[in-house]
Amino acid sequence: MSAAAGLRRIWLCADDYGISPGVNRAIRDLIERGRLNATSVMMVGPAIQRSEIEALDAAAKSSPRCAIGLHVTLSAPFRPLTMHFRPLDGDMFLAFPKLLRAGLMRRLDREFFRNEVKAQLAAFTEAFGRAPDFVDGHQHVQLYPQVRDGFVDAVSETAPNAWVRQCGRNLPLAQRMASLKAMVLDILSAQFRRRAGAAGLSFNPGFAGAYDFTRAADFGALMRQFLEGLPEGGLVMCHPGFVDDVLVGLDPMTDVREREHAYFAGDAFPGLLADSGVTLG
């Protein structure tokens, strides 16, 4: 019997590859150390040049199999790849609260989102020479009402073998109700799973990784909570990175990224995986 027998294999996915050179460098560092086994790429990010794509490909090939996915981006401060995309705020996507609100009020046209997701899928395929292993969404946009219809249409038509990310948790009701944000993700994910399943798309059976990024937290303690009850094939979302001027200009998540990188690169993380009966291999 192998040493890995009985261990739960999970996905530990670093989001936002392409948002800045510092984030890219931190993600590649963790892949090369064997501390990540997935990352998702923003094809509309400012740090997605050919050299950054080649460096990610090289890092993934030097490590045990690392999945590379598309991080569909449909919210500000990023811009669409398709012409005539609507709705926009100036030349940018809407901020995510406005986008979610518009979807809930049924004010969006799924075709705009279908076409934009297909354009981002095509950009990924051109850059990497293949379709993505999976497709997820920046700021969970793939879950939003109406947006999810265009998203599922585009993935099922263009990359039907890719799995898609849902963000529902495998927790008792009392624990799920402790966080309003996570409860919203649970509700939206239930609707997303039905839509994706009807289209024949597969998805991760469990999800963890959401927390209050604005507060300094004990990330090791959070990771222990994330792994509790996560099923085989479940996914933990993370956001490691090194802060640089590009990141500061685009995203409020700065120092928290460096704290996450330091934890994953440190000695405590492999011990936590072993204690939790989890493997990335």
Image (cartoon, helix red, strand yellow):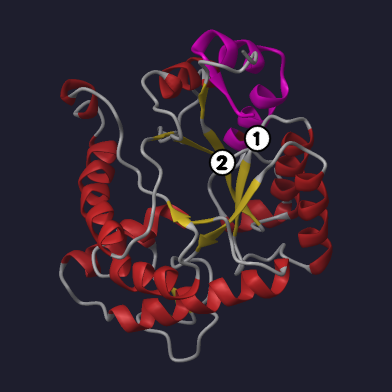
Q: Can residue 11 be spotted in the picture? A: yes
- Residue at mark 1: 36
Instruction: Name which residue lies at 77% across and 30% down.
Output: 33
- Residue farthest along the front direction in this orientation: 1
Q: Compared with residue 251, is residue 253 higher up or lower down, i.e. above or below?
A: above
Q: The disc labelled 1 sits on which kind of residue?
A: Leu
Q: Nearer the viewer, residue 164 or 110?
A: 164
| Majority SS type along the magenta span | helix
158 with respect to 86 (left or right): right
Image quarter (top left, top right, bottom left or bottom right) of the C terminus: top right
Whether pointer 2 and pointer 1 mark residues with C-beta atoms closer than 8 Å, the reply is yes
Label 2's element? strand
Of the pair 141 and 236, the residue shown nearer to us = 236
Residue 155 appears at what percent x and percent y?
43, 68
Q: Position of residue 60 (x, y in %)?
A: 75, 46
Q: What stretch is highlighted in magenta?
A: 256-281
Q: Which residue is drawn at 53% across and 47% down?
A: 252
**Closer to the camera, 62 or 98?**
62
